[in-house]
Image (cartoon, helix red, strand yellow):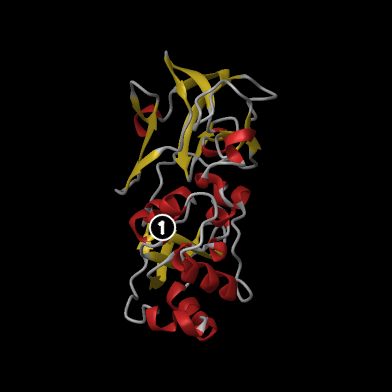
């Protein structure tokens, strides 16, 4: 029996991608659990910031922390709201400078459809793995989060910025010519970001996920409604565990939940 607070699975870029669940004193290699029965039991909450036993509000944080800490500020989800490049504080300028004033990548990724996205350069290809993308390409490398954000905003007028997670999990996806899409979108990059366009970056990154069986129709496991679940693990994609009975469990959406995990 393993016991710990759920956090985003750590990954290793290989073929297939290796997944590790951090359970505090133990790391579980999820690839080694394929085709084995896993029991998951909800035990309690633990906020990832204050570590108190409080109901989780969003992103693994209790409500108090979510509205206070810089790790949950609006610019996390909406990078165009970043202000550290102006020396302007949102919640904690030192933290915001550290996170925002570093190279960011604007990219195209194909998980359920081709979408535009933004991530810190040091999160490539981790971000693509977390999204369950089977192919991706870099569009631009900019020096801060703000420039990445305004580029994404400009491009999403011409291409999606959302992933259909159900389609991604059933593997109802098709390969796309990401280079052609990148060239199509290039004219729409804002003037101040145009110098950072990666014209010569033409190689797509392809990702292989450890999935033995995709679900035909997904049903999501909700620990609030179903505090105990048992199923045979058939795959891992994005941040989802995929089980034999078509149940899927989003680890990231359940950050801050303390669980017991038993493996047959």
Furthest toward the right, the residue is 225
Q: Where does the image place residue 147, in percent across and percent down from the top left?
A: 47, 71
- Residue at the image position 43 percent from the left and 23 percent from the top: 36
- Residue at the image position 51 percent from the left and 86 percent from the top: 187
Q: Is residue 17 above or below residue 65?
A: below
Q: SS of the residue at dot 1? A: helix
Q: Badge 1 is on which residue?
A: 97
- Residue at the image position 65 percent from the left and 29 percent from the top: 222
Left or right: 124, with 4 as reference point = left
Please state the total of marks drawn on the protein image: 1
Seen from the viewer's position, the closer of residues 72 and 237 is 72
Residue 231, quarter of the rendered image: top right
Q: Quadrant of the C terminus?
A: top left
- Residue at the image position 45 percent from the left and 21 percent from the top: 4
Can the viewer see residue 248? no
Q: Is residue 196 above or below residue 230?
A: below
Q: Is residue 118 above or below residue 237?
A: below
Left or right: 186, with 197 as reference point = right
Q: Quadrant of the N terminus?
A: top left
Residue 55, quarter of the rendered image: top right
Q: Where does the image place residue 150, in percent across and percent down from the top left?
A: 54, 72
Furthest toward the left, the residue is 14
Residue 248, quarter of the rendered image: top right
Seen from the viewer's position, the closer of residues 102 and 197 is 102
């Amino acid at each position: 029996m393993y016991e710990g607070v759920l956090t985003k699975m750590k990954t290793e870029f290989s073929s297939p991608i290796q997944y590790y669940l951090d359970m505090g004193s133990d790391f579980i290699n999820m690839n080694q659990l394929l085709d084995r029965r896993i029991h998951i039991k909800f035990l309690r909450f633990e906020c990832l910031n204050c570590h108190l036993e409080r109901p989780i509000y969003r992103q693994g944080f209790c409500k108090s922390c979510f509205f206070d800490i810089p790790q949950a500020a609006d610019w996390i989800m909406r990078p165009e709201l970043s202000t550290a490049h102006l020396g302007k504080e949102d919640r904690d300028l030192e933290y915001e400078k550290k996170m925002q004033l570093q190279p960011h990548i604007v990219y195209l990724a194909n998980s359920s459809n081709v979408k535009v996205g933004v991530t810190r350069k040091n999160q490539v290809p981790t971000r693509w793995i977390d999204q369950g993308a089977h192919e991706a390409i870099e569009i631009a490398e900019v020096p801060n989060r703000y420039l990445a954000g305004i580029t994404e905003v400009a491009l999403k007028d011409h291409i999606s910025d959302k992933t259909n997670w159900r389609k991604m999990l059933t593997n109802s996806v098709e390969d796309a010519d990401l280079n052609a899409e990148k060239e199509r979108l290039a004219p729409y990059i804002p003037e101040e970001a145009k110098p950072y366009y990666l014209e010569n970056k033409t190689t797509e990154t392809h990702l292989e996920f450890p999935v033995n069986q995709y679900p035909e129709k997904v049903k999501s496991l909700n620990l609030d409604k179903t505090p105990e679940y048992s199923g045979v693990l058939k795959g891992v994609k994005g941040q989802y565990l995929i089980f034999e009975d078509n149940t899927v469990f989003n680890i990231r959406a359940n950050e801050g939940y303390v669980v017991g995990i038993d493996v047959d």
